[in-house]
Amino acid sequence: MHQFLFDYISKYMPLTEDEKKVILDLNLFKEVKKGTVLLSEGEKSNLGYFVIKGCIRKFYIIDGEEKTTNFYTEFQGEVPECAINNKPSAYYLACSEDSIISASSSKLDEEVFAKFPRFETLCRIVSEDLLVKSQSSLDEFKNSSPSKRYENLMATRPDLIQRIPQHQLASFLGIAPQSLSRLKARLIKTKK
């Protein structure tokens, strides 16, 4: 698992053996079981999450119905609004599958950055990269039909289709589960 992370980081900058040791010594990584709720609506938290392996789902409960707004998989992260503004969370974060995540606070980040300033640069570069991808994905989502959203999901994140229950995928796409079933059937028929 650690080598998996180090390989990812090396895409942005090489790490020294001392830096690798610091990452390991921080003991930031924890295994979390599927179904674990990391953050609930109304709760305050100062933690941000980064997925090493697995999947975290972000969702709201509106009129008793779950509305999924995002999935964070390998090497994606989420810093809840409540970690920034110190207000209660408006949404939930839960593990959609057994996961290995890191959870850190801004205080811990500052301590690490003080010891190794390059980590701050690394975090900024990774954050900028993730922000650009997220914004592009959101723009595409807002400007497309459910059919195009599903096709885009198949093209950009095909792993989600296998990993996530259909009712959660449908919620994420903004359609009913039955509509997703019909959409999939129509796409299969079109490809024949």
Image: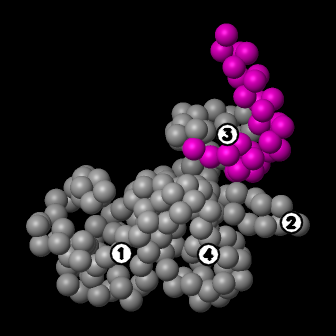
User: Residue at the location (71% across, 42% down)?
Assistant: 166
Residue to which mark 4 is pinned: 39
Graded by Cα atoms within 10 Å as few (under 14), some (14 to 19) or many (20 or more), the crowding at tag 4 reads some
Q: Magenta stretch?
A: 163-192
Instruction: Tell me the SS state at disc 3.
Output: helix
Q: Find the distance from the CA under tag 4 to the CA under tag 2.
A: 18 Å
Query: Which image quadrant for residue 71?
Result: bottom right
Q: Earlier in the sequence, mark 4 or mark 1?
A: 1
Looking at the image, residue 133 sits to the left or right of residue 81; the answer is: left
Residue wearing tag 3: 149
Q: Residue furthest right?
A: 63
Residue 26 in sight: yes
Q: Which mark is residue 28?
A: 1
Label 3: few (<14), some (14–19) or many (≥20) C-alpha neighbours in 10 Å: some
Q: Secondary structure at mark 1?
A: loop
Callout 2: SS: loop
- What residue is pinned by disc 2? 64
